[in-house]
Image (cartoon, grey):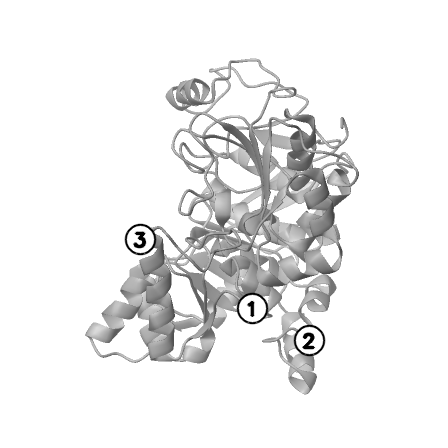
Amino acid sequence: MKQNIINKIWQRHVVQSQANFPDTLYIDRILLHEVTSAQAFAELKQRNIPIRNKQNLLATIDHSIPTDKNRAVISDAIARTQVDTLRANCAATGVTIFDIESQHQGIVHVVGPELGFTLPGTTIICGDSHTSTHGAFGALAFGVGTSEVTHAMATSCILQDRPKSFKVEFKGLPNKYFTAKDAVLKLIAEIGIGGGQGSVIEYVGEYIRSLSMEARMTICNMSIECGARAGLVAPDETTFAYLKDRRYAPKDAAWDLARQDWLSLVSDENAEYDQEIIIDIANAGPMITWGINPEHAIDLNSVTPSLDAGGDRATLEKAYAYTGLHVGQSLLGKPIDFAFVGSCTNGRIEDLRAVAKILDGRKIAANVTMYIVPGSEQVKAQAEAEGLDKIFSAAGADFRMPGCSMCLAMNPDKVPEGKRCVSTSNRNFIGRQGPNSITHLASPQTTAASAVAGFITTEEQL
């Protein structure tokens, strides 16, 4: 049978397989953060089980850490306990942690790639659903529960059912203002939040090959939002150029050997998949979500859907009631209160450069509060080296310290009740950015343009 890359990587990592039972899958890399790791460390300590292959673990602090200048002082007791516990666990076990002021602290899914810890052909897990981000490098990366993190820390293996494979091809030439964020929102709008359930998606096609690694990470990051276990892109010269000479990437002769191996990580011609779809992006423009899950997304030049447009009618009714919108409404011109640029979806230097290009020489509207949060200390340092921080400051934006920030209401950065936010993050669930807050997911470009205008708009219209 002609094999796709998903099955190739999986088969390389199967330690044991038996009928009617999950595979024993070898895990190459484990990423840890402060929210989902404490129970794993505690279980191993209680049972006196050592960590196996601790050199394959990497920890950082991201979800609960404040992003203001005084972030070393954590006033919230739960957040402080989470952060202190991870620090103590890593100190006690010798697991590598990138803490604040290490020059590499940040969102775990930003830090892993920029350190070269994320490599093609590897299996990567983390107690975080957006682990799918790392699939941009041709890795099989997926979120797991804390018990599975515990098993992997103890044995370097987990039990896992073999996933289905799903081939997604973007076809056509989009509007010049169309971004990777728009592409993945368009996919989710077409197939729904359950369209990829049980599958690993391979993204293919000329459009995908034209994208930078950062843009590929954006697409793979949101694979989970259509129900997929993971998403990936086969490695190519773009991948290798990004990884070369990074801290944990192979060096010298080992690099040459690894690169040759990575070149074999490609789906065979006419490989079989459980599911395939072509997403037409010819002349497609910027997207935005209007409702309460990522499936509720529309082209900004269109209007909100009717209650009979497909999907669950009760959910659509709930979405309209929560967001204060109505059927057949254009979101263009809708006033906003907050704009957020950041998260593991769009908190990289490429995203910040796109925002700076729009904000340069402009002012953020008086009715808008804008947070720009770098995904890591490295991203922040690069932005400052390029003078982007000065552009943000002159425009009236708040350029903050690295962390998950306003993506989710687990730290002080929250959207107040009833306020409307255009956000580059990945989820627009009810209360995701703060109790009774309203979230519209969009690209960094749309978010920046809307912050300047004071209402939802596009870079093109600005």
Quarter holding the N terminus is: bottom right
Q: Provide the residue designation for mark 3.
A: 78
What residue is at 73 percent from the left and 39 percent from the top?
Answer: 359
Q: Which residue is mark 1?
A: 121
Question: Cβ–Cβ below 8 Å for labels 2 and 1?
Answer: no
Residue 215 visible in the shown view: yes
Q: CA distance from mark 3 to mark 1?
A: 37 Å
- What amino acid type should be assigned to the residue bearing mark 3? Ile
Res. 447 image quadrant: top right
Q: Mark 3 packing: few (<14 Cα in 10 Å), some, or many (20+)?
A: some
Q: Amino acid at mark 1?
A: Gly
Q: For the view shown, which residue lies furthest in the left direction? A: 46
Query: Residues at badges 3 and 1 in contact (C-beta under 8 Å)?
Result: no
Q: Residue at x 43, y 34 (%)?
A: 429
Task: From the viewer's perspective, tell me whether residue 429 is left or right of residue 133.
Answer: left
In 3D space, how far apart are the residues under numbered discs 2 and 1 (Cα atoms)?
A: 18 Å
Q: Is residue 134 left or right of residue 128?
A: right
Is residue 457 at least partly visible in the picture? no
Q: Earlier in the sequence, mark 2 or mark 1?
A: 1
Q: How many marks?
A: 3
Residue type at mark 2: give it.
Asp
